[in-house]
Amino acid sequence: MNTSTKPALTDIKTIREQARRNIEEGAVTSGYSANREVVIKQLNDALATEIVCVLRYRRHHFMARGIHAQAIAAEFLVHSNEEQGHADMIAERIVQLGGDPDFSPESLTVRSHAEYIAATNLSDMIKENLIAERIAIDSYRELIQYIGTEDPTTSQMLKGILAVEEKHADELADLLVDLPSKV
C-alpha cells in the first residue's frame, strides 16, 4: 500500500492546543469539516420526519380494527417506539453540533419528508406507513451521501437509522402479502 496517499497524523502537541481553542463548542472541534448549519437544518428536517412517523404509527396503532388488527397494531406500536428513538438520537446530535432541535408543532408537517395520512383501514394504514418508510430510506441515503466522510458521527448514526427504516419497510411489505385490500 502506498503510504504517501494517507494524510499525515497530527502531532499530540498540536492536537492538545487545538482542543483548548473554542472549548465552548463542545464536541465540534477544528477537525469538523462539514457545513454545520446545513447538517443541522437537514437533521431538523429528519427530526420532523421521525416525529410525524411516530404520530402516524401511534394513530394507526389505536385505530386498527378487524380480524388482523391485533398483530398489526402491535407492529405499529413497535415501529412508533423505534421512530421515537430515532427522533431522540437526531435531537441529541443536533445539540452536540451546537444547534437547537426544532420540535415546533406548527412546522412539523412542512419540514417532514413523510406525510401524515390517517388512513381508515388496515391495508391503507400499512401502505401509508410503507410509503413513509420508503421516503425515509431515500432521504437518509441521500443525506448520508451528502455528508460523506465530513461528519463520521452523524453519518454513522444515520446509517443505523437507515438500517432500521429498511427493516420496517420489509416488515410492512410482508404484512401486505395475502392481506385483502379493504381490511
Image (cartoon, rainbow, N blue to C red):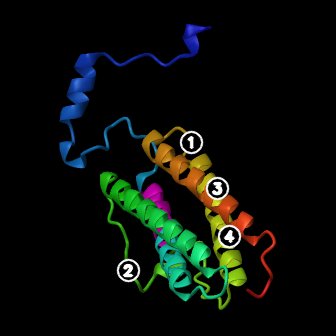
Span colored in magenta: 37-48
Q: Earlier in the sequence, mark 4 or mark 1?
A: 4
Nearest-to-viewer mark from 2 and 4: 4
Give the labeled residue for mark 1.
148
Label 4–label 3 contact, CB within 8 A: no
Q: Earlier in the sequence, mark 2 or mark 4?
A: 2
Disc 2 marks a residue whose amino acid type is Ser
Q: Is residue 98 left or right of residue 122?
A: left
Q: Residues within 10 Å of mark 1 (few under 14, many from 20)?
A: few
Q: How many marks?
A: 4
Q: Is residue 72 left or right of residue 13?
A: right
Which of the pair 169/122 is nearer the observer?
122
Nearest-to-viewer mark from 2 and 1: 2
Disc 1 marks a residue whose amino acid type is Gly
Q: Is residue 65 left or right of residue 100?
A: right
Q: Earlier in the sequence, mark 3 or mark 2?
A: 2
Give the labeled residue for mark 3.
166
Which of the pair 139/116 is nearer the observer?
116
Disc 2, SS: loop
Residue furthest to the bottom: 120
